[in-house]
Amino acid sequence: MQVGSFKILIEYFLNLWYCVVHAPQKAYFKITKEGVRHMKKVAAILVVVVLVVSMASFVFAAESKMGTIKSVDTQAGTVVFCAEGSTTDVTLKADKSVDLSKVKAGEKVHVSIDKDMLMHIMAAPAAAPKASVGC
């Protein structure tokens, strides 16, 4: 469904809803069983469309991890990454939008990964110093 047709469908539903809600105040509008049945169908279609779109966003979401960069190959556009709590290194191909010149080996980072593709990388926040205990 295209965006334009989706907008038209929403406008139609809102207009129909407005007419049903304000019908008792306006004598010229008459509610029919066919109109109510039609509005229920439109509402059901809108609910299904919203559910499908929201579920699709979960499917295409990138995975976010924290870890350490083991090595960077700017020529090949790859990064060897080891996630926190893992002992295995993963070689990730960097997306075109990722600037590998700012990344160094041994650096702690926060990355977004989508199917072995490095989508986003940023330095991990530094750990806050522990407050001294006592007087």
Image (spheres, rainbow, N blue to C red):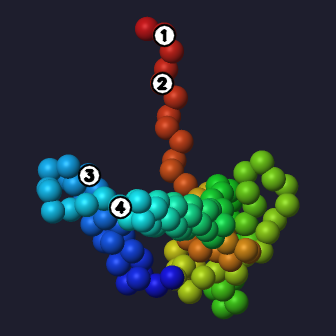
Q: Marks 2 and 1, Cα distance to the nearest angstrom?
A: 10 Å
The kind of residue on which mark 1 rests is Gly
In which quadrant of the rendered view does residue 116 lie?
bottom right
Residue receiving disc 4: 32
Q: Position of residue 14 (x, y in %)?
A: 30, 64
Q: Secondary structure at mark 1?
A: loop
The kind of residue on which mark 3 rests is Val
Q: Secondary structure at mark 2?
A: loop
* Label located before the other in sequence (4 or 3): 3
* Label located before the other in sequence (2 or 4): 4
Q: Is residue 34 left or right of residue 105?
A: left
Residue found at x 50% / y 34%: 129
Q: Dot 4 surroundings within 10 Å: few (below 14), some, or many (20 or more)?
A: few
* Label located before the other in sequence (2 or 3): 3
Pointer 2 with pointer 4, Cβ within 8 A: no
Q: Dot 2 surroundings within 10 Å: few (below 14), some, or many (20 or more)?
A: few
The label shown at residue 131 is 2
